[in-house]
Amino acid sequence: MPGPACRNRFAPPSWPWFGLPGSANAPGVELVNFLARNRASGQWTDFAKPGGGQRGLGIPNVVDRVVQQAVLQVLAPIFEPRFHDSSHGFRPDRGAQTALAEATGNFAEGYDTTVDIDLSKFFDRVNHQRLLSRLARHIEDGRVLKLIHRMLKAKVVLPDGTRVSTEEGAPQRGPLSPILSNIVLDELDWELDRRGLRFVHYADDFSVFVRSARVGKRVMESVRRFIERRLRLVVNEDHWPAIEKRIHGL
C-alpha cells in the first residue's frame, strides 16, 4: 500500500474557469452558487435489469455532466496511481480482459476456489461522509470538496416531476461516478491486500481466490463483516454465499 499521501493542491491553470484561487466574483464562486440554486441535477429513470427487477439511475443534465468531467480531470491524476493493481473496472488500460488474465493466473497457481462478492445497490448506498473523508485526505481545497458534496446531494427529478433529495448514494451514468466508486472501494482493495488475499475487483464485484472451501468460508464471513461494519455497505443476499471450486478456470 502506498505510504502517506502528499497533500495535493489544485493549481490555478488546471481549473481556470473554476476560479481557484480567486475572489468572491471569480467564476468558481459563481459556479458553486449556481449549483446551490439549481440542485436538481438529473432525471431519474428506471431500467430493466437482465436478471429481473428494476435499476433506478439518475441521469445527469448537461451542466452537471460538464462539471463532473472537469472534476474528473483533476481527481484522476491524484487517485489513479493509488488504486490497487487488482482493481480493473473503469480504469485506463484496464478492463474485463486484464481482470480475466489475473483471475486465470490465480487459478493456474492453485487458487482454484473463489469467494464471489456482489454488493447490493452499491451506488445507492455510498455513505457521503465516508467518501468525502477519503477525498479530503488528498484534497486540501475546501471549495472543491464542497462542490463534490453538492453534486452528491443534488436532487433528481422523478418521472412525475417530483424532486427528491439524495441523502446517500453516488451519481450514476455520469463522468464522475466510476472514479468515485473506485475511491470508495479502494479501502476494501487494500484491506484484502493487507490480509494477503488474492482477489480481482471489477466495478462493484469482487472475487477472492483461495485454495479450499474451508478457507473460503472463513474469508467470506470476515470480509462481509468489514464491508458492512466499516464501509457501511450491504452484501447481496441473493448471491451469498457464493463459494465455487473452478476446475477449468472461468
Image (cartoon, rainbow, N blue to C red):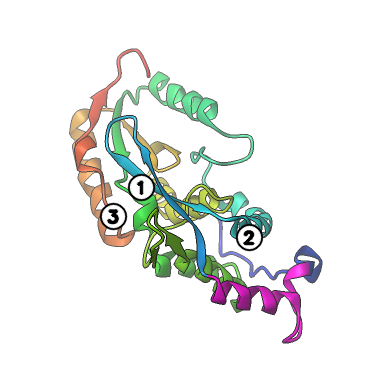
Q: Seen from this angle, which residue lies furthest right?
A: 13
Q: Residue at x 68, y 79 (%)?
A: 29
Q: Which mark is residue 29?
A: none
Q: Residue at x 28, y 48 (%)?
A: 223
Q: Which residue corresponds to mark 1?
A: 195
Looking at the image, do the residues carrying marks 2 and 1 touch, with CB atoms under 8 Å apart?
no
SS state under label 1: loop
Query: In the figure, is residue 74 to the left or right of 181?
Result: right
Nearest-to-viewer mark from 2 and 1: 2
Query: Spatial distance from mark 1 to mark 3, Cα to Cα?
Result: 12 Å
Span of residues in magenta = 17-38
Q: Is residue 127 above or below residue 119?
A: below
Query: In the figure, is residue 148 to the left or right of 124?
Result: right
Q: On the image, which quarter does residue 226 sit in?
A: bottom left
Nearest-to-viewer mark from 1 and 3: 3
Q: Which residue corresponds to mark 3?
A: 226
The residue type indicated by label 2 comes to Val
Q: Nearer the viewer, residue 4 or 226?
A: 226
Query: Spatial distance from mark 2 to mark 1, Cα to Cα?
Result: 43 Å
Q: Residue at x 81, y 66 (%)?
A: 13
Q: Earlier in the sequence, mark 2 or mark 3?
A: 2
Q: On the image, which quarter does residue 119 sit in?
A: top left
SS state under label 3: helix
In the rendered image, residue 118, in percent from the top left (x then y), is placed at 31, 40
Q: Which residue corresponds to mark 2?
A: 63
